[in-house]
Amino acid sequence: MKPLRRGRGFTLLEILVALAIFAVISITVYGRVGDVLMQTGSLEARTFATWIAQNSLTRLQLELAPGELPATGRVVENVSMTNRDWELVTEVSATGEAGLRRVEIRVHQVGEGGTRGDDAIASLTGFVGRY
């Protein structure tokens, strides 16, 4: 009769080491995925805010009659885009040239309860001329 051969397998220690390595890798990957999702959401918000600012500047230019300049001052309006609320702050100021106005547009995202963030998500500076 032949002696019984012990099966070659993993020891408990080897399995524990493998599980520990897998756990460390899993935690690292999970953290990176969370970072990527946050960056993607932030990039999406900045992209929409930039589009809103560009649309506002274009609308301002198109609404003016030929030879007309926009009035100087500050205008705050609320805009809804992509099922989100945005606050648009437009400031028109005079420049050194009589036929030219500086337009600065800042876009803030409005959160729940109507509160907006202090920092603008996007800002755009453009110039509108008489001609």
Image (tube, rainbow, N blue to C red):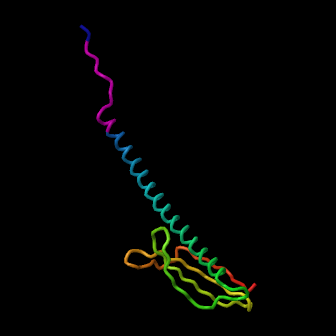
Provide residue 2's location: percent of width, then percent of height: 26, 10
Q: What's drawn in magenta, residue-wise?
A: 3-15
Spot occupied by residue 106 in the image (x, y as percentages of width and height): 55, 79
Q: What residue is shown at x 34% (from left), y 35% (from top)?
A: 14
Classify residue 84 by image quadrant. Answer: bottom left
Q: Is residue 1 above or below residue 53?
A: above
Q: Was residue 67 drawn as part of the magenta stretch in this picture? A: no
Q: Residue at x 42, y 55 (%)?
A: 31
Furthest-left residue in view?
A: 1
Q: Nearer the viewer, residue 79 or 18?
A: 79
Q: Main secondary structure of the magenta part?
A: loop
Would you say 44 lies left or right of 12 here? right
Quadrant occupied by the C terminus: bottom right
Q: Look at the picture and state if 17 lies above or below 29.
A: above
- In this rendering, the count of numbered labels is 0
Picture layout, residue 107 above or below residue 68: above
